[in-house]
Image (cartoon, rainbow, N blue to C red):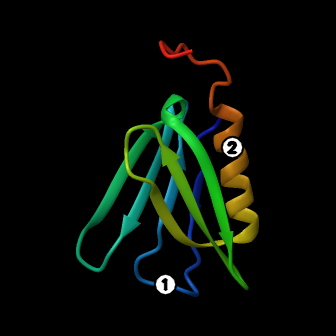
Amino acid sequence: MPNEKFRSSSFKDPLTPDEVVFNDKGVTFRSRKLIGGTDNFVFFSDISGVEIDNGLFFATIRVIPRARPEIVIRNFSKGDARRIKELILENVPNHRPDAFR
């Protein structure tokens, strides 16, 4: 999978857009603020779910990693949100070794 990068709408938040960056092993979620921000990297194997909350024009993406709090990124176009969810779900392994099966 090539490295892909998505940015939230600059219309809604021109100074501090959120970003989603894909690489071969996982996804980095960058949530920016005027001062600072957070970078969360999650391996594909650690993702248990992805949810999209659609608004009138923009969407909020909720990524649910295993054993960590959910990651929320806001103000993406609905098309980008669907594509992000699709890319994550394509790369999440279907059969992971689990001791509790």
The amino acid sitting under disc 2 is: Leu
Q: Locate residue 3: give its quadrant.
A: top right
> Which disc is residue 39 wearing?
none
Q: Is residue 58 above or below residue 47?
A: below
At horizontal 59% and vertical 62% (from top left) the residue drawn is: 61
Instruction: Judge by depth and name the residue closer to the eye, 34 or 62.
Output: 62
Q: Secondary structure at mark 2?
A: helix
Q: Quadrant of the N terminus?
A: top right
Q: Secondary structure at mark 1?
A: loop
Asked if the residue under mark 1 is in contact with the one under mark 2, i.e. CB atoms within 8 Å, the reply is no
Q: Which residue is mark 1?
A: 13
- Count neighbours of disc 2 (C-alpha within 10 A) and say few if under 14, some if 14 to 19, many if 20 or more: some
Between disc 2 and disc 1, whose residue precedes? 1
- Count neighbours of disc 1 (C-alpha within 10 A) and say few if under 14, some if 14 to 19, many if 20 or more: few
Q: How many marks?
A: 2
At horizontal 64% and vertical 37% (from top left) the residue drawn is: 2
Instruction: Judge by depth and name the residue closer to the eye, 35 or 73.
Output: 73
Q: Which residue is mark 2?
A: 87
Q: Where does the image place residue 52, in percent across and percent down from the top left?
A: 66, 63
Instruction: Say whether residue 34 is left or right of residue 49.
Output: left
The amino acid sitting under disc 1 is: Asp
At horizontal 50% and vertical 65% (from top left) the residue drawn is: 73
Q: Where does the image place residue 63, in percent across and percent down from the top left?
A: 53, 52
Q: Where does the image place residue 86, in percent across and percent down from the top left?
A: 73, 47
At horizontal 24% and vertical 69% (from top left) the residue drawn is: 36
Furthest residue to the front?
Answer: 100
Q: Is residue 28 above or below residue 26?
A: below
Q: Where does the image place residue 47, in percent across and percent down from the top left?
A: 53, 38
Q: CA distance from mark 2 to mark 1?
A: 24 Å
Q: Quadrant of the C terminus?
A: top right
